[in-house]
Amino acid sequence: MQKLLDIQNLRVTFPIGGKEYPAVDGLSFHLNRGETLGIVGESGCGKTVTALSLLRLVESPGKIAEGKAIYYGDSPEGVDLLALSEEKMREVRGNKIAMIFQEPMTSLNPVFTVGDQIMEAIQLHQKVGKAEAQNRAIEVLKKVRIPDAERRINDYPHQMSGGMRQRVMIAMALSCQPDILIADEPSTALDVTIQAQILELIQDLIVEMKMSVLLITHDLGVVAQVCDRVMVMYAGMKVEEAPVRRLFHMPKHPYTIGLLQAIPPLFDEKGKELYSIKGTVPDLSHLPEGCRFSDRCPRVVEGCHSKVPLLKYVGEGQEVRCINY
Amino acid sequence: MTENSTTQPHYWSLLLRQFNRSWLNRIGLWIIIFTALVAIIAPLLANGEPVYLKHQNKTYFPILQTLWPIKMLKLYPELAGADYKQWEKEGAEVRYTFVPYSPNDYDLNSILLPPTRAHFLGTDEQGRDVLSRMIYGSRISLSVGLVAVTLYTVIGIFFGALAGYFGGTTDMLISRLIEIMICFPTFFLILTLLAILGPSIYYIMLVIGFTGWTGIARLVRGEFLKLRDQDFVTACRSEGMKTRRIILRHILPNSLAPVLVSATFGIASAILIESSLSFLGFGVQPPTPSWGDLLSQSRDFIDIAWWLTIFPGLAIFLTITSYNLVGEGLRDVIDPKLRVN
């Protein structure tokens, strides 16, 4: 497998009351060419911040404190995205690495037609005329299976449904044929049938365009359907990583096990309460001592509170950060 | 091609439809359009030079001498100082526009005449036609409103956009500057500045422009604060757009609706300020007519010549009311809480 993106020791901090707190703390992972990596975790685990920091779009006052993100798309020796000049970075955004967002209802500019917006994205990175840009926009809208693309190109976002808008967002992201697609909960805001369609579409496009995808979600069902590999994050740290089958069959970390148990089963006795992990993700400024999951963990032992456990390789591409292994 | 049932009208045409629902809004808009037209075609409405003249078997169109840019050609040097009334008596054929007087044509034989066939709105103490002076006065009043408001809208958008988008220290500095500007009693500031600079219509435009931008700046700042965190702005950045492009092309058009409302009210108040200043003698210099100036001149004759006061006063009142009506209408239309479908 050829590495396309290699993130090393990424640390993103936010100031709270004058002190810097890490939303992402010492995160390392990689994305192989043509692979789909899922990043899973509850809200507030640092998934979105991780994605935004790869494009260096973390909103001030948050900042990338340290780390590297080596991108091997242009040259075998790679470039560090976090050290690029702002101008070079703009050439990467949308062109090499594109992103789609959670909220299709607000991710499009309400005052321009969708065609204008896709054409703008194309013309930002490619020297093409208006007519050619329009042709490509129609082409890419067809690719995301928007019926009657020649006409829908003149629609304003408010004339489209949520699913349609998400297709437009995907079309925009694909318009420059990026190497990497970052999809931040692309189906969360949609209703279930549309979710399925959008996921299917993304899956087809991955194969068709040979893209590498970073899929952020809190829905393990989505992970099972789309991903090759999964990384589970908790409170800014990687707690477990494994190939997708392995994760579902042999989850190690108590947090992963909890997440899997919290999936509503299709057939179950009526009236049985659905499992949930007690508590919530800790506040950045009130992280527990030692293992960050220790205050919610059902398998907590004495050593858990003393220091953060190291990531441990447990075979077959699986890593886990837990004192019990 | 079949009709696409999902196609909805564009945002602005929706607003227009909503706006047209109220007859007050429509009246306001029509008065604004009417006054604007009058101001634009003033020389075609009121002109002392005839449209058509046939004198000693030669045909002239003397009105052309007064129209820019044709007047540069100096078409009829032989007509300089011509007495059309005399020629008419001698048998020349003369046709005038709607009001056959230029604003500064005085006639000491017909001073302070009440409204008649010859002078629809009467004459003033120098025998000048009031309607003609009002028609030309609309040019001054409306252009002050338009230029001053355009100027301060641009300044306001500039500062508001900077403060709202960048936040932090930039925002702090600009917000404090706005607060300082607001503390000045604007009208007296304008009076003082004009007293130093000297009365001139251009100074009025500039001074209103440079003192009036705070309201717009605050509005735009608020809109930018709201919009810059919207997903579509992050999406723009993730596509690799430059900050300038994001601000100008993507955020600004989304923040313009409330600015439009505020600017409409602004035009009304700028016209009022100009009228007040002219009334106080700081405005345009005689004999150039402006509505405020006409009112001011009429003071001495208010007990014997009511028409000198009523008509310019009415013009100011109607114009300002219509701008306020339209502003109010626009504000209701863009307020989603009041929207009816």
Image (cartoon, coloured by chain):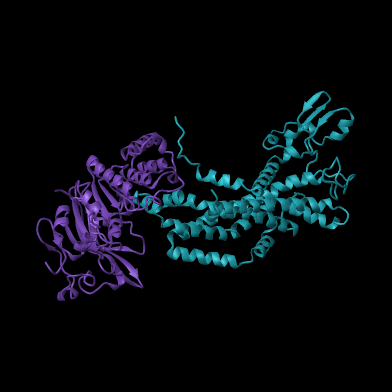
User: Chain A, which colour?
Assistant: purple
Q: Is residue B151 visible?
A: no
Residue B189's spot in the image, x, y percent? 65, 64
Chain that is cyan in the image = B
| Rendering quarter of residue A8 | bottom left
The residue at 21%/71% (across/down) is: A294
**Which is nearer the eye, B2 or B153?**
B2
Left or right of A242 in this view: A158: right
Question: Looking at the picture, how far across and down is residue B128, in whole percent?
Answer: 83, 46
Let me know if residue B233 appears in the view.
yes
Depicted B70 relative to depicted B121: above or below: above
Q: Quadrant of the N terminus of chain B?
A: top left
To which quarter of the image does residue B35 belong?
top right
Q: Is residue B245 left or right of residue A46?
A: right
User: Residue furthest toward the top?
Assistant: B57
Residue at the (44%, 46%) spot, across then down: A158
Residue B174 place in picture, x, y as percent: 50, 63
Q: Residue at x 53, y 56 (%)?
A: B337
Quadrant position of residue B6: top left
Q: Position of residue B258 (x, y in %)?
A: 54, 54
